[in-house]
Image (tube, coloured by chain):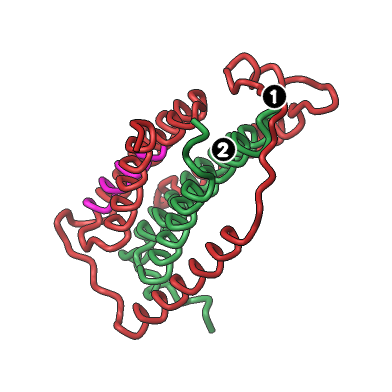
Amino acid sequence: MNQIPLEHILFVSTALFFIGVYGFFTRKNMIMMLMSVELILNSVNINFITFNKYLFPDKLNGVFFSIFIIVIAAAEAAVAIAIIINLYRSHNSIDVDDTNEMKY
Amino acid sequence: MSIPSVIFYMISAMILICGYLSVTTRKIFRAAIYLLFCLIGIAALFFFLENDFIAAVQIVVYVGGIVVLIIFSIFLTHKSGEEMPMASLKKEVAALAAVVSGFILVFYLIHTNTFIMDSNEKVAPTVNNIGTQMLSTDKFGYVLPFEVVSMLLLAAMIGAIVIAIKVKPKQ
């Protein structure tokens, strides 16, 4: 398994992270922004698992951290979708440009 | 090229292409489906890295939970088939510049850093080892974060119900 260089896996996770950042910057729809955040969190998971496997094979800390990241991502997605549904009820839109009551 | 590396590059291509399409497509339902395939590709990468338990958790939580939740909320808040507006050109160029420069910086750092490979005795990430260490109260046990995260999940569940509940109008 060690014939895959570490850098190639890190290339994939870095590219996925910046794809998520690009989506977060360019989209205005709240669900799309939530999906971009999921991509970012997943790229971090790939990094944790890879470092655990390649650099610290005698420990399991990377596995625990990725389990906790998955749990927190699930909690975050549930609360974010509840907020989005509530926002849609009150504003009839989930565009971030339409929700500017607290901006000024 | 050996067969494992061919499989790895195919999985990587699937992850990156589906992720890119997910943030650039203009139909939001298609974006959710591309996200689904991207997450399946990440689970395949975890299987490839011999972390079976994390891969299974990834499939159960993300593919079975979060993507379904996202698709439900798309159906609740969108007319299906509606196209999203494009971002303005100025914003797109700025985002692209930030992303490309950030990627080059991070990958330069990765490239110049020397990673010290550890050749200690390997601990297999089996369910047995993970469960034993996660629930142990010894020196390297993870029982305190486990309990804290369970409280966080409970709080998030109650919070989501309270936020999304429909308030009845008073008679």
Residue A90 visible, this orientation: yes
Whole-percent x, y for residue B65 in the image: 40, 35
Q: Which residue carries the number 1 mark?
A: B134
Q: What color is chain A drawn in?
A: green
Q: Is residue B14 above or below residue A86?
A: above
Assign a secondary structure to mark 2.
Answer: helix
Q: Which mark is residue A49?
A: 2
Whole-percent x, y for residue A100 in the image: 45, 77
The residue positioned farthest toward the top in the image shown = B128
Residue at image point 59% right, 23% down: B125
Which residue occupies the foreground of this view, A72 or B128? B128
- Looking at the colours in the rendered structure, which chain would you say is drawn in red? B
Assign a secondary structure to mark 1.
Answer: helix
Mark 2 is on which residue type?
Ile
The alpha-carbon separation of the residues under discs 2 and 1 comes to 16 Å
Which quarter of the figure has residue B4?
Answer: top left
Q: Which residue range is magenta in the image?
A: B29-42
In this rendering, position of residue B120 left or right of residue B126: right
